[in-house]
């Protein structure tokens, strides 16, 4: 178990170092040597976890959705809200997640599929919307795929604007506002009335996630 814990910590430190270098220099200008120096690990340790710079970048990109399990909720739309609010919270407090988002938006990052996190998040949102529909939480007209793509794209745009204007200091509030505008157009009124979309929702749910992981 101790060896496994060390491996997890080493992988995390390599990802954080890679994220910092990608964020500072851009993907194309970053080198594996710089990442090794920043992480303080040997080349062998790095290549034990990652096969290439591209593989490192994909690991950083995956960090956006690498969280969970989420606390159970009777409403699947509440889980959809929680996923968005937790990501907003992590973007404010987790350097790895911030760098992951920056890498996804780096138009100079040639040679990697920057669409992967967007595609994964759309799929995650669509799956949660499908479960919500099966529980009778959605209005009849809702197109699951289009709604998932709209929410994903709107979130990306809002977080970018918040980043530019105030280094994401108001991101929790902005995503709460986004949800309060989007959800009434898709949710059954009785379900909508019970949803918690408060700006501090992400912080509260993330604390629950961390507590679950410690058990």
Image (cartoon, grey):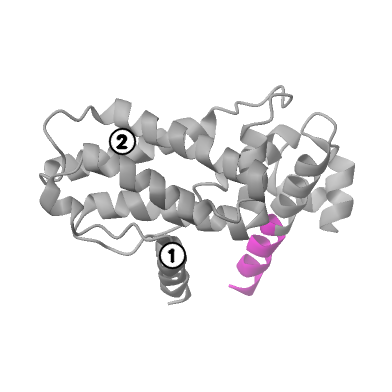
Q: How far across and how far down the image is residue 170, in percent?
A: 55, 54
Quarter of the figure with the N terminus = bottom right
Look at 47% across and 70% down and name the residue there.
210
Q: Position of residue 12 (x, y in %)?
A: 67, 57
Is 180 in front, or is 79?
Answer: 180
Disc 1: which residue? 200
Q: Which residues are magenta?
A: 1-12
- Residue 4 belongs to magenta span: yes
Badge 2: residue crowd in 10 Å (few <14, some 14–19, many ≥20): many
Choose mark 1 or mark 2, whichever is in front: 1
52 w.r.t. 4: above or below: above
> Whole-percent x and y of residue 126?
31, 35
Residue drawn at the location 38% of the way across and 29% of the way down: 149
* Secondary structure, magenta segment, majority class: helix
Locate residue 86 relative to residue 103 in the image: left or right. left
Location of residue 55 by image quarter: top right
> Residue at 65% across / 52% down in the picture?
96
- Tell me where residue 115 sits by quadrant: top right
Left or right placement of residue 179 versus residue 160 in this view: left
Q: Which residue is mark 2?
A: 126
**Which image quarter holds the C terminus?**
bottom left
Disc 1 and disc 2: Cα gap in Å?
Answer: 24 Å
Observer able to see residue 47: yes
Q: Where is residue 32? Give x, y as percent.
A: 84, 40
Residue lying at 80% horizontally and 28% vertically, measured from the top left: 28
Q: Does residue 171 belong to the magenta stretch?
A: no
């Amino acid at each position: 178990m101790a060896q496994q814990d060390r491996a997890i910590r080493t992988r995390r430190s390599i990802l954080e170092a890679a994220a910092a270098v990608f964020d500072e220099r851009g993907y194309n200008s970053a080198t594996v040597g710089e990442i090794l120096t920043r992480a303080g690990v040997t080349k062998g340790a790095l290549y034990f976890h990652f096969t290439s710079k591209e593989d490192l970048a994909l690991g950083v990109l995956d960090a956006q959705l690498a969280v969970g399990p989420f606390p159970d909720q009777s409403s699947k739309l509440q889980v959809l809200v929680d996923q968005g609010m937790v990501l907003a919270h992590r973007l404010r407090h987790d350097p790895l997640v911030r760098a992951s988002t920056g890498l996804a938006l780096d138009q100079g990052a040639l040679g990697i599929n920057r669409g992967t996190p967007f595609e994964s998040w759309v799929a995650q949102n669509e799956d949660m919307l499908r479960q919500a529909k099966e529980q009778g939480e959605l209005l009849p007209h809702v197109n699951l795929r289009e709604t998932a793509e709209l929410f994903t794209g709107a979130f990306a745009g809002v977080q970018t604007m918040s980043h530019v204007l105030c280094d994401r200091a108001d991101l929790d509030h902005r995503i709460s506002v986004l949800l309060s505008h989007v959800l009434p157009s898709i949710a059954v009124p009785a379900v909508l009335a019970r949803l918690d979309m408060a700006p501090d929702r992400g912080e509260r749910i993330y604390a629950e996630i961390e507590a679950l992981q410690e058990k």
